[in-house]
Image: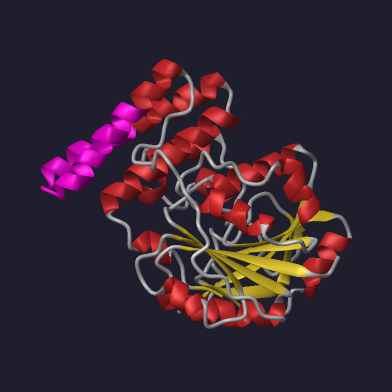
């Protein structure tokens, strides 16, 4: 049970990937890199390391790429690892947590620049209707210490102590293959990213599977490298699309309607604020698109489509580098 396959999903990650892979090949038995149509030298960087490399011809999104990577491996333990995460310690305590019954085990993420624990990101609780309402209305930004936000982001949790937890980020967690397969992997409707890891862990919790936090294991996290390269307007549309998909999947209709109405109020206010401040036209248009998308989801009372997703997603292996580790 101790053999680990690390799955690293990349998209324009060349700047950070060397650190990630150098550590991953040291601590894992197999490393698989699935590249989502990067336009930089990500594939070339990955090919320098003893990894299996799969290059997609289109951006299939994080969930689909993670599913691809897991399917390429056979190890009983799978480590999901973002390309901007650098393992700093051996993974044996996580393996032991899985041996003792945890389906998912995670460690501490440390800010690579400040060397401080990433409170609010390393661990979160599952979003409630209130936490999402506070988020989309901007209350958490204006009043970050409010009790709803503190509970959601686990700001009341002592990160130095092991614990059973709800939602570690998909950037860094170890999962038993048996649990992954029982849950059917990640839901590829969350495209291209956001909330696919929350959905996976929510389904794990609903199935009665244990999720364990082990602070003896830790890693450096540079943070949001691919997301930071995205156009602000695109990020807005994609984030809300995934949020709505999660909301309509996991909340009762009454709560889903309340969150959707809060989105409408929030994006209307943000649009007015952007126009008054003469901000970028693209952001204003993005909020208008989100408003329309939310209205459509309310009318359908179903999950929204992700605008801009390729109609046909083709996968090809551009290069595979295999070495015995």
Nearest the viewer among 296 and 72 is 72
Image coordinates of residue 170 in percent, x first then y, are 59, 57
Does residue 27 show up magenta in the picture? no
- Work out whether 98 lies above or below 19: above
Q: In the rendering, at what x and y percent does residue 307 appear?
A: 35, 37
Between 155 and 73, the residue placed more toward the observer is 73
Residue at x-position 53% and y-position 75%: 116
In this orientation, which residue lies closer to the viewer: 215 or 237?
237
Query: Would residue 282 appear left or right of 107 to someone viewing this image?
Result: left
Q: Is residue 157 above or below residue 161?
A: above
Coloring applied to the structure:
secondary structure
**Residue 86 in the image: x percent, y percent?**
57, 76
Report the magenta residues as a range: 265-293
Is any part of residue 110 visible from this angle?
yes
Residue under the point 57% across and 30% down: 249
The N terminus lies in quadrant: bottom right
Residue 114 visible in the picture: no
- Which residue shows up at 58% across the image and 28% down it? 251
């Amino acid at each position: 049970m101790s053999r680990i396959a690390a799955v690293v999903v990349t998209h324009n990650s060349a700047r950070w990937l060397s650190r990630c892979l150098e550590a991953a090949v040291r601590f894992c038995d197999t490393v698989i890199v699935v590249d989502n149509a990067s336009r930089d030298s990500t594939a070339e960087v990955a090919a320098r390391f003893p990894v299996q490399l799969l290059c997609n011809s289109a951006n299939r999104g994080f969930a689909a790429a993670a599913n691809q990577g897991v399917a390429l491996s056979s190890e009983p333990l799978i480590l999901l690892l973002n390309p901007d995460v650098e393992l700093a310690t051996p993974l044996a305590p996580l393996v032991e947590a899985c041996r003792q019954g945890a389906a998912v085990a995670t460690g501490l993420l440390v800010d690579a620049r400040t060397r401080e624990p990433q409170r609010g990101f390393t661990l979160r609780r599952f979003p409630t209707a209130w936490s999402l309402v506070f988020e989309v209305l901007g209350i958490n930004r204006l009043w970050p210490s409010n009790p709803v936000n503190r509970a959601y982001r686990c700001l009341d949790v002592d990160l130095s102590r092991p614990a059973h937890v709800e939602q570690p980020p998909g950037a860094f967690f170890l999962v038993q293959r048996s649990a992954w397969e029982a849950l059917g992997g990640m839901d590829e409707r969350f495209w291209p990213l956001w909330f696919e890891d929350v959905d996976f862990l929510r389904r794990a919790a609903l199935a009665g599977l244990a999720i364990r936090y082990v602070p003896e294991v830790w890693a450096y996290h540079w943070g949001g490298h691919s997301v930071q390269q995205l156009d602000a307007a695109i990020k807005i549309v994609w984030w809300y699309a995934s949020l709505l998909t999660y909301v309509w999947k996991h909340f009762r209709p009454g709560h889903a309607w309340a969150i959707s109405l809060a989105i409408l109020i929030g994006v209307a206010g943000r649009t007015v604020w952007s126009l008054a401040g003469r901000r970028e036209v693209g952001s204003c248009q993005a909020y208008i698109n989100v408003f329309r998308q939310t209205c459509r989801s309310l009318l359908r009372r179903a999950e929204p489509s992700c605008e801009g997703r390729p109609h046909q997603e083709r996968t090809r292996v551009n290069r595979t580098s295999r070495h015995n580790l």
